[in-house]
Image (tube, grey):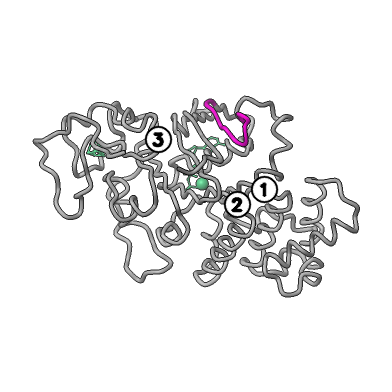
Amino acid sequence: MTTPHLQVEDLRVTFDTRGGSVSAVEGISFSVAAGRTLCLVGESGSGKSATALAIMGLLGPNARCRGRILFEGMDLASLTDAQRRPFRGKRLGMIFQEPTASLNPVLTIGQQVREAVQLSRSLSRRSAQLETQELLRAMRFSEPARVAEQYPHELSGGMNQRAMMAIALAGRPSLLIADEPTTALDVTVQAEILSLLRRIQAERRLSILLITHDLGVVAHMADDVAVMYAGQLVESGPASMILDNPRHPYTHGLWRSMPRIDSPDRPIPMAGGLPMRQGWQTGCRFRPRCPHAFEACERDPQILMKEVTVGSACWRNVSSIGAESPSASSPMKENPTDH
Ligand SMILES: Nc1ncnc2c1ncn2[C@@H]1O[C@H](COP(=O)(O)OP(=O)(O)OP(=O)(O)O)[C@@H](O)[C@H]1O
Ligand code: SF4
Ligand SMILES: [Mg+2]
């Protein structure tokens, strides 16, 4: 049994907007085990980034967050912004999808990494400089001194992403959150960044929460997987189980619809889209798109995900989806998931 490094319990995120409140995350629970990678997947708008930002304490002023975020003995959600600041950039690091948008265009790479180093520890300028070089070298820059003098626009997308990784690791975090870190990069560079991430994880015993749209990334990186749909968690468990034998019809459709960096097969798009938030109905939210829906699905299957780390919020046992569709006249009476 692996120890949870980060444990998220019943997390809820709501944004206040001019058009009313937008419920982005609705009571999700999952954990990232020490030294392991949990991939959080789901369609655009399902609430993945809102979840990551809630953990980092980086939601904007129009956001309200409830639930528990247990990390190294603290409930981060119960802390004030000032109390949370020491965790950000130190024990908790984050890298984003668009490195060029996250880096400051008027500062050199060296200045930005050094700033992150100095924010996390009180070091002399000289020591911070040495640490900066060391971090850039660890990010596999062959000429760290030269890169340190360069501006983001002088580097390629992949180099900028490695610089972002140096910044995220400057505080020696124990947990790294990576929100689509390779989506903006071309395939070869994606593979390089992912292998670097794995190497760093092994060297530094990092726990990683990785948000991705790419099934190949999940296959390469994930130890565990959590699948989100319309603000809820619909399936979670070990990667080997969820990749090879998805139980939830959404996971199954998602896998078929996702691109793979390691496969030429064309993705098969899933019919329909996320339901409009205003139109969220009772029962299973995936029902309008689900080829396996039946009467029982009018009841909310989220109950099946309560207090489990391995499970599927579906009233059917869908382990045979793809081979054979279950009969619509035989609704499951009990939790169909094996734990
Ligand atoms: N600052 C905000 N104010 C209002 N609504 C927001 C805000 N941030 C996110 N949302 C809404 O919350 C929902 C979840 O957004 P989120 O960014 O978490 O999705 P996501 O799963 O990360 O999608 P993507 O894969 O496109 O990045 C969306 O409906 C989005 O419009
Ligand atoms: S609960 Fe019903 S509608 Fe929802 S995914 Fe399962 S079979 Fe489909
Ligand atoms: Mg996002």
Give the structural element (helix, strand or loop) at label 1.
Answer: loop
Q: Position of residue 78 (x, y in %)?
A: 62, 25
**Image point 82% across, 67% down: which residue?**
149
Query: Outermost residue toward the front?
Result: 1
Q: Position of residue 8 (x, y in %)?
A: 51, 34
CA gap, disc 2 to disc 1? 7 Å
CA gap, disc 2 to disc 3? 26 Å
Q: Is residue 17 visible?
A: no
Residue topped by disc 1: 173
The magenta segment is 66-76
N-terminal-most mark, 2 or 1: 1
Q: Circle 3: is it few (<14), some (14-19), or many (20+) Cα within 10 Å?
A: many
On-image quarter of the C terminus: top left
Decide which of 296, 128 is in the foreground and name it.
128
Which circle, 3 or 1, is nearer the viewer?
1
**Image point 43% across, 49% down: which residue?**
224
CA gap, disc 3 to disc 1? 28 Å
Residue topped by disc 3: 232
Type of the residue with mark 3: Gln
Residue topped by disc 2: 206
On-image quarter of the N terminus: top left
Give the structural element (helix, strand or loop) at label 3.
Answer: strand
Res 273 quadrant in image: top left
Residue 150 vs 170, above or below: the answer is below
Do callouts 2 and 1 mark residues in contact (Cβ within 8 Å)?
yes
Which circle, 2 or 3, is nearer the viewer?
2
Which is the main secondary structure of the residues drawn in magenta?
A: strand
